[in-house]
Image (cartoon, grey):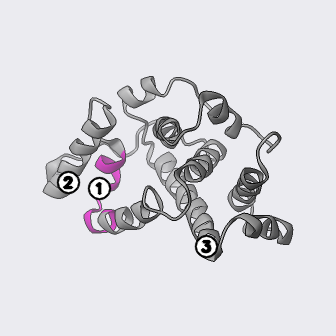
Amino acid sequence: MSTRLGPGGWRELGLVNWVAAHVGGLATRSGEPLRLITALGRHRALFRAWLVYSVSMMPFGRLPRRDTELVILRVAHQMASHYELAHHRRLARRAGLDDREIERVCSAGCEGWSDRTTAILTATDELVIGVGLRDESWAALSVHLDERELIELCLLVGHYRGLASTLNALGVAPEHGVAAASVRAC
């Protein structure tokens, strides 16, 4: 993948986004500013609005962090988003997923998962591949999620699908330190 939009500096990003990129790099121990911010932060106002929306689902959403990371990894795998995979493998470990589960979520099918996780992964697959959910999938999800969680799940999948498309289109690769630390590819 070739980079189509190089990282912006403080002139392109503005002071706030430039600082956020560097603080994010320190927080993730990537050894460099976060490329997500140095790319998307070039559109200063849109980036800040996007960031508020993004953090309202991850990490501050209603869904448990484990479920959120399963969804994000599944979307990232299906969308071939190396950036999201590298970052969210690490975040998934912090949310309690082990390496075997991380590898499994990045494969086709839902065998061996709990009923709740199967419903979530099936819905994720349908939302990434199609344009909605089958009635059976909605019914299965409704057993495990309340109304707000159902809405959040749909928005979470759509958000990370869109982010993956954007990162892929812009050619944003994971930071060297994050890519090396995430170990295996899904």
Can you tell which mark lies on residue 16? none
The outermost residue toward the bottom is 147
Counting residues from the N terminus, which is met first, the one under dot 3 or under dot 2?
Answer: 2
Vertical side of 86 occupied by 69: above or below: below
SS assignment for the magenta stretch, majority: helix
Residue 36 locus on image (x, y percent):
37, 47
Q: Is any atom of residue 2 visible in this view?
A: yes
According to the picture, the residue beneath numbered tag 1 turns out to be 41
Instruction: Residue at 37% x, 33% y: name it.
Output: 175
Closer-to-camera residue (95/73):
95
According to the picture, the residue beneath numbered tag 2 turns out to be 12
Q: Label 1, label 2: how many angstroms apart (C-alpha)? A: 8 Å
Mark 3 and 1 residues: CB-CB less than 8 Å, in contact? no
Quadrant of residue 48 in the image? bottom left
Closer-to-camera residue (77/4):
77
* Amino acid type at mark 2: Glu
Magenta span covers which residues? Answer: 36-47
Residue 75 locus on image (x, y percent):
62, 50
Vertical side of 131 occupied by 108: above or below: above
Mark 1 and 2 residues: CB-CB less than 8 Å, in contact? yes
Instruction: Residue at 43% x, 55% y: name it.
Output: 59
According to the picture, the residue beneath numbered tag 3 turns out to be 151
Residue 166 is a magenta residue:
no
Instruction: Residue at 54% x, 56% y: name it.
Output: 160
Q: Label 3, label 2: how many angstroms apart (C-alpha)? A: 35 Å
Q: Is 136 positioned to the left or the right of 57 in the image?
A: right
